[in-house]
Image: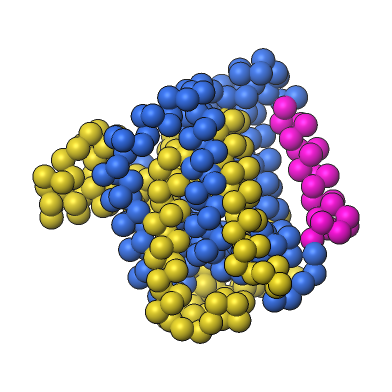
Chain colours: A blue, B yellow
Amino acid sequence: MNTIIILLVGLTFGFLLNKSGMTKYSKIVNVFRFTDMGVLQFMMTALVVAMSGLYGLKAVGLVTFPNVPATYIVGNLVGGLIFGVGMAVAGFCPGTCVAGAGEGKLDYLVPGVLGFLTGAAIYGLTYQTVFPAISSIANSGAAIIPELWNVNAFLFIILFTVLTLVLFYLIERGGWQRHKEV
Amino acid sequence: MNIINYFKKEEWSPYVAGAGLGIVGILAVFLADSLLGASGAYENIIGWVGQAVAPATFDNMYFNYVMPPGISNGVILLIGIFFGGMLGALSSGTFKIRTNDNPQWNKMMGKTTWKRWLLLFVGAIILEYGAGIAGGCTSGLAISGGMLLAPSAFIFITGMFISGIIIVRIIYKDNY
């Protein structure tokens, strides 16, 4: 049963990655050029909807949270910096590569997937020398912002939503999206 | 525009697709007690292949305990993502077996397929390694962690944008 649900979740996720245009090289790279902010609009909308829904459901006792991704400042940041380099070069990420492969893109199915598997092997084989060291610096474990900063979760979510809407306004009307062809 | 026509459209508003993704993120937790993710699945798969092909090399802490090999939930999710992408492309009539399909890439990096394949292969290695260190990728950490209000997600997103902007500036030079 759980397997079928997860398969359906993946199916919908892949469908939305296709419809949002995230499976295109230009869509990913152009967010870094500020000429198409679709990646940011897509991610921020998803975050606002999901955090409101999940914290709402948690407040009325309908969900318990699964394992929260751990916070270890240096590792999260360095990992993000490395990740961004790959995104800028390839124009995909681990999920959009597979969704794009499903669309018939051989560039994603062959070198893309093989690259991720190779990267996974290299990471797994060097894990012991890299990860324990970097993840022990400034490690707060499975921290969440409301507990860490002692702030009401809904207050934070409202603030986050307002900032997101301001960002969308600046993108749509404030000239934060440039117009430049390559 | 009616809803069926909207489903057939090649590209949706990022707000509509994003709201959809938010709902999917909620449902994953609510129905299956799991998070979205992608990078971890590659670890499960390569651990599985590696332990079959080179058991001594892949017999380590990581592949035995941290990311156990085999068909994990993450792998099932990844299979779903593949067919979801296919369904999306079929719905808009854009499904096609192809290479070098992005005009911007062809203009900036050239139409040579082997060069694109080499760069995507190297890029994917970098992405997966970065995701490993960070503790997840765009879906497993940025979206899944962010929606639970984990600081790690926002630190990761910041890092990703800093280096992404720098590297694209370097690659695009005058065309940035």
Q: Is residue A175 magenta?
A: yes
Q: In the image shown, does A150 or B130 lie closer to the viewer? A: B130
Residue B61, image x and y in percent? 23, 34
Image check: A2 left or right of A97?
left
In the rendered image, the quadrant that contains the N terminus of chain B is bottom right
Looking at the image, how many numbered discs can be counted on the residues?
0
Quadrant of res B58? top left
Q: Position of residue A111 (x, y in %)?
A: 37, 69
Q: Is residue A172 above or below residue B112?
A: above
* Farthest residue, direction bottom: B111
Q: Main secondary structure of the magenta part?
A: helix
Q: Is residue B95 left or right of residue B146?
A: left
Could you say where residue B40 lies in the image, as x and y percent from the top left?
A: 37, 45
Which stretch appears magenta?
A156-177
Q: Position of residue A166 (x, y in %)?
A: 83, 44
Quadrant placement of the C terminus of chain B: bottom right
Q: Residue at x 60, y 77 (%)?
A: B108
| Residue B82 appears in view | no
> What residue is rendered at 68% in x and 46% in y?
A44
Q: At 40% across and 48% down in the image, what residue appears?
A: B129
Residue in front for this viewpoint, B92 or B146? B146
